[in-house]
Image: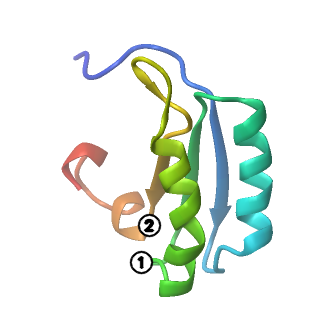
Amino acid sequence: MHCGRTTTELLFTECKTYDHFKRIDTARIMTLSKAFPGAVLVFATLRKELSIEEKKLLYRLVNRGRKYWKADRPYNPVLILTGSELFAESRPEHS
């Protein structure tokens, strides 16, 4: 069965098991995003949800990534995955 897009995407990922994302993590990803416009930025944690501090930290990066650098392409889309999505029994688009 074939589902979704079939193009290859460049991803940069910051993963945490149960630790929190910190400013150094977003700074590192921001550097990569400037060098690779169009790359997808992924933040993944096994915790059930992000803390308020983490949401504030990621806010600027997420909004910057939404701006378009090509007519049909955001500058750097951001994907945030928590334990809710990573441990879900259903496919990602349904969780």
The amino acid sitting under disc 1 is Glu
- State the SS at label 2: loop
Mark 1 and 2 residues: CB-CB less than 8 Å, in contact? yes
Query: According to the image, label 2 marks what residue?
Result: 82
* Residue 30 horizontal/vertical position (percent): 72, 50
The residue sitting at 44% across, 66% down in the picture is: 82
Quadrant holding the C terminus:
bottom left
Residue at x 67% of width, y 56% of height: 14
Measured along the vertical axis of the image, is residue 24 above or below residue 89?
Answer: below
Residue 26 in the image: x percent, y percent?
70, 62
Quarter of the image for residue 48 reads: bottom left
From the viewer's perspective, tell me whether residue 36 is left or right of residue 86: right
Colour setup of the view: rainbow
Residue 49 has which mark? 1
- N-terminal of the pair, mark 1 or mark 2, is 1
Instruction: Give the image location of residue 55, x and y in percent.
Output: 49, 75
Instruction: State whether residue 84 is above or below residue 53.
Output: above
Q: Image quarter for residue 17?
A: bottom right
Which residue is located at x 72 percent, y 51 percent? 29
Viewer-side residue, 81 vs 32: 32
The quadrant of the image that shows the N terminus is top left
Q: Among all residues in the image, which is located at the extreme bottom?
A: 52
Crowding at dot 1, Cα within 10 Å, few <14 / some 14-19 / many 20+, comes out as: some
Q: Amino acid at mark 2?
A: Thr
For the residues labelled 1 and 2, the Cα–Cα distance comes to 6 Å
Q: Position of residue 28 (x, y in %)?
A: 80, 55
Q: Is residue 3 left or right of residue 77?
A: left
**In the structure shown, which secondary structural element does the residue marked by tag 1 occupy?**
loop
